[in-house]
Amino acid sequence: MGVPVKSCLIIIITNLLIALYFLSACRKGVTETGFVAPTVLQIREKLEIDENFPIVFYSTAYLDYRYKIPRLRVFAMNPCVTHKEYMSAEIGLNQKKKKVKLRGEPTEGECPWHWATQCFYNSYIWTAELGEANGTEMVGIDQITIHLNNRTISLKVQEVHPKRKGGFTVCVQPVYWYSEYHNIALFIETWRSQGVTRFIVYYHSSTTQVRNLLEYYRNLGILRLRPWPSFGRLPTRLFPNLKLPSFDSSTYRVGHTLAQNLCALEMKTEIGAIADFDEVMVADKEMLINYVEEAMKPDEVGALSFSHLLVKFEPKISTMDFHGVVKPVFLDRNGPPKTIFNSSAVDIIVTHSIRRFIGNETTIRANGSLLHYRHNSYTDPAKEVQKPYSLFTSYPNLHIKRIQKTLRKVFGSSIPPYNSTYLHVLNQCITKIVGEGKCRSTVEYCKQWMEPLTDWVYDTTEGIFVV
């Protein structure tokens, strides 16, 4: 008896779908030449930690006295390593040489990071314990030399001590292709009104308007610009047959968690936070700094976690009208929290939490919120909710006048209109990266999209990263 036509069609369609599935799965790992592309871990298996190991170092190492036994900490971008692997290094101690072993740990606690499985390079902290608890034999270290067989890398050394009480520092992770200068003006004014005394901004690239505004705040003495240029070229001597990806083309974003942990060491104040230019943390009932200082008095409290709350302003601040800030519109949209922390107590920081403390400190939930005035809040269908928060605890109109005065000082009486094309194109590029399942190395991948749009200002400081 013959098979019914309907059954035949079902069988044919099913087989076709199965074939398409496997074809799609195979294509994800096949190059244009028809060969299966190795994964990042398969490439890593062919590498040894020797002169050919693809690693780029931050030019400053840190002698960290916040631990009972001082630690030497080296920051780098490199492929995944195991806990058994190490690098040999030599330090100068009172005009004598001492050899140490540096062992690496990914800042995210896993490698590859589950958000960046296609990225070959990861943020790493390489550590060696030094000397006795009193640290007396550590005096005089000003350089470390790392030996990778015949390859040597020299880094300068900076001391880190427990931070001073008083003051409040906010760090901004590396900004790249950044154009929203109106966000920066609101960011600085709101955080200052909440008690912040110092800002550290890691800088890669931006529009001229953004750079001019940041330089204005730097000249006021309240903001420090830290250079974060491209990582540099991969030396051609390193495994040319393997065709290793360049640092910039296979690093998630621009190594943001590396910069976050560096900033925690660089800040001079005990109280610190890491935020983006469209975020501010506020307390339920009082000025933020007053709440934080009281909440963090117990020794066991190392950080406060602020839950996320999406915000929009009407009119949009991108129109350079900031009056909507007085009565923000809150939206019921979940998002990851961020923390305010004791910088003397944190060991490793990740974007939304403290991964590990130096001692037995812990993170508690804050009586407040992280207000996120993200650009896409205006198209978000989330319902409006009532909240008691205000970006300015007093005299909001005075703060708005100060923002407008600042913008006029920087740009003149005719403040340039914001061009949303830059952000729109950048988001299109990111969507394409995610859709293709590639490493979100936004700086390198989006260069062909972004560079024709305007005259970008890049940081080109030499010697920040050492290969």
Image: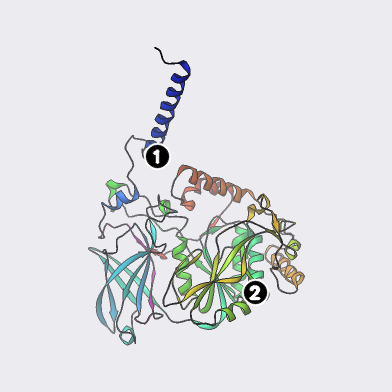
Circle 2 packing at 10 Å, graded few (<14), some (14-19), many (20+), is many
Q: Which quarter of the figure is the N terminus placed in?
A: top left
Choose between 461 and 108: the one closer to the eye.
Answer: 108
**Quadrant location of residue 296?**
bottom right
Residue 150 is marked as none
Residue 217, position in %: x, y?
A: 61, 70
Q: Secondary structure at mark 1?
A: loop
Residue to which mark 2 is pinned: 194
Residue 185, position in %: x, y?
A: 66, 65
Residue shown at the point (25%, 79%) measured from the top left? 97
Q: Is residue 341 visible?
A: no
Residue shown at the point (46%, 78%) measured from the top left? 344
**Quadrant location of residue 265?**
bottom left
Residue shown at the point (33%, 34%) measured from the top left? 34
Q: Give the magenta-colored segment's residue range.
A: 47-69
Q: Amino acid at mark 1?
A: Lys
